[in-house]
Image (spheres, helix red, strand yellow):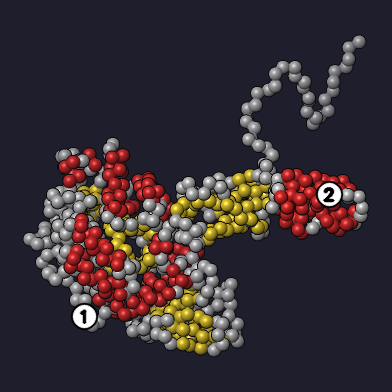
Amino acid sequence: MRSAPLKKTPGTPRVRKSSGPAPRVIVPLPDDGRRRVVIESLSPNLGEGFAIKRTPGESVQVEADIFADGHDRIAAVLLYRLLGGVEQEWRETTMTPLVNDRWQGSFTVEHVGRYEYTVEAWVDHFASWQHALHARVAAAQQDLHSELLEGAAMIRAAADRTDGAARQWLMEAAEALEAPGSVADRAERGLSPELATRMAAAPDRRHASRAEPLSVIVDRERARFSTWYEMFPRSAGPDSMRSATFQEAAERLPEIASMGFDVLYLPPIHPIGTSNRKGRGNALVAQPGDPGSPWAIGSAEGGHTAVDPGLGTIEDFRWFREQAEARGLEVALDLAYQASPDHPYTREHPEWFRQRPDGTLKYAENPPKKYQDIYPFDFETDAWPALWLEFRDVVLFWIDQGVRIFRVDNPHTKPFAFWQWMIADIQARDPGVIFLSEAFTRPKVMRRLAKLGFTQSYTYFTWRNTKAELEEYFTELTQTEMQEYFRPNLFTNTPDILHAFLQQGGPPAFRIRLVLAATLGASYGIYSGFELFENHAAAPGSEEYLDSEKYQYRQWNWDQPNRLNDLIGAVNRIRHTQPALQYNDTLRFHLTTSDALIAYSKVAPGGGPRIFTVVSLNPREVCDGRVCLSLPNDTVADDETYTVLDLLTGRVYSWRGAWNYVRLDPSNPAHIFHVDRMSRA
């Protein structure tokens, strides 16, 4: 008899038995499908393998979204270690939940070098068991025998993962849960906080999930906190018709050191080409005796690893560096990858340069500007590997001479990939080498250079002069992701930039910009002449200096009575004695009743006194108004009385409540207050 055909109920899939081989797996199985925890949005994370930045003693606060299917409890740890063969094993610290599956943990970096960090998380079956047991006890359920045996089994498994006294304690706890007797007593033992702690110390992490590791570069302290002075050593001599020698330039060192600077930055000190040499005021034709621009590097006397004969020899440079270091000044050198027409490279490696159709080499241009005395290198040459290695070796040469800080000229005109490789190679050899990016260019380019390895970066500070501009810009620098990798260095002026604010504001403008630079940023710098209130522009509307040192020897009257030295020294002493001013990420702006007054404060990351700075932004008139000490997370009660000490003048003021009155004039346009709210005014 034929059986009736099988009827398929609508919506029910037909099950087909197969006697053949198992079907081929198209999508591979995961390595371990028992990993249930998801780890997402790990931060800080710059992407593309870029590392965040810290200095020894600073912390890294890590957050991540961590969750799993179902309702099980989760445990998570933050893992970190110092690379370079120093630490093979991970160190770890417990992470704690915030809200909405967001978790947080932190660790402190201790040594210069590269660390890596990640997050590991797993389903915590014992914590889940305790949570469920607590719910059952709260519901007065009596039949808990099976649940207690389940807990005992987990405790025994944990005991097997430990030894010594810890193992014995856990074994006894398991026996207590298994023993006959009062269910309530056994449940109470199972819910013990001490048991929870001991079980957390011996977790079952066989099916843990782990995020991809991220990196943090730990630089020496000077990368975070530094005070720069830029000088042309060739202008530091007694004769305006010739270059000063390093021995003569060394006579300037005591005064520079006395003002509290710790980095002495020298523009290029190499031989200067004579072909197409620029004359005074950037004239196309040099006159006899014109020294040319130091950035037109290279002559018959040598190139990037040679010293201009007017300054001396390489031995003279080493002597000068030693003299500077004896006074607490670390010498930084300009690193400018460009060449004059007379550089040995143009003869030995013409393939490193771009050629015109007529066979001549192409000089540098930034239309409408022309730099006939400079040839740029062609980074798209087929010989790029040799070019990269040569430029790396230039840095290694100067490191051998004792230089560990380089201010890099126009890095945004060279490939990102080159800088990423070169800086990584140098810092793998010596992690204490510092690179300052002199890139006044588009924001995304500046940020990219910082991400790929530059230790410090020039900023738009020079062009931020109003209260709104300053608050917006420095909030971006210090309270967004930029603070993880972009270390600003605030130069008040440079050989290329004399801002209209300084040109038109007279000495008060110099005082204002000095205090702003030194207190808004942990690193700042001035170019020599600033302390003499040098504000003569080449032409109306120009930011170029009249009689620019870039094209001539310049003698300065360092003995003139009207100088800024005392204020510079006072501000720098405050910076070195107040840890709050040595960091950037605690900068917060405060309310004022006048747009001519800007107020902001900092505290050291570990706590301590608040340094509250108030600056007038008007160099011509007296400015007054009320300033508010309160912040959203640190309010001052209306009846609270306390004292503030002006670190610039030594005067003590009694303040009451959050809002208090200040008055600033052009001769004294700033207060730097040490706030003592523990005192009673």
The amino acid at mark 2 is Glu
Residue 244 horizontal/vertical position (percent): 16, 65
Query: Depth check: 502 or 177 in front?
Result: 177
Residue positioned 91% across, 10% down in the render: 1
Dividing the picture into quarters, in which one does residue 563 lie?
bottom left
User: Is 384 left or right of 39, judged from the image as shown?
Assistant: left
Disc with the residue nearer the chain's start (2 vs 1):
2
Compared with 487, 668 (above or below) is below
Q: Which of marks 2 and 1 is in front?
A: 2
Residue 610 horizontal/vertical position (percent): 50, 76
Counting every numbered tag in the picture gives: 2
Compared with 240, 288 (above or below) is above
Dividing the picture into quarters, in which one does residue 369 lie?
bottom left
- Label 1 secondary element: loop
Task: Let me know if residue 545 appears in the view.
Answer: yes
User: Is 559 left or right of 483, judged from the image as shown?
Assistant: left
Q: Mark 2 points at which residue?
A: 175
Q: How crowded is mark 1: few (under 14 residues within 10 Å), some or many (20 or more)?
A: few
User: Is 487 left or right of 509, judged from the image as shown?
Assistant: right
- Residue 560's tag is 1
Q: Residue furthest left?
A: 288
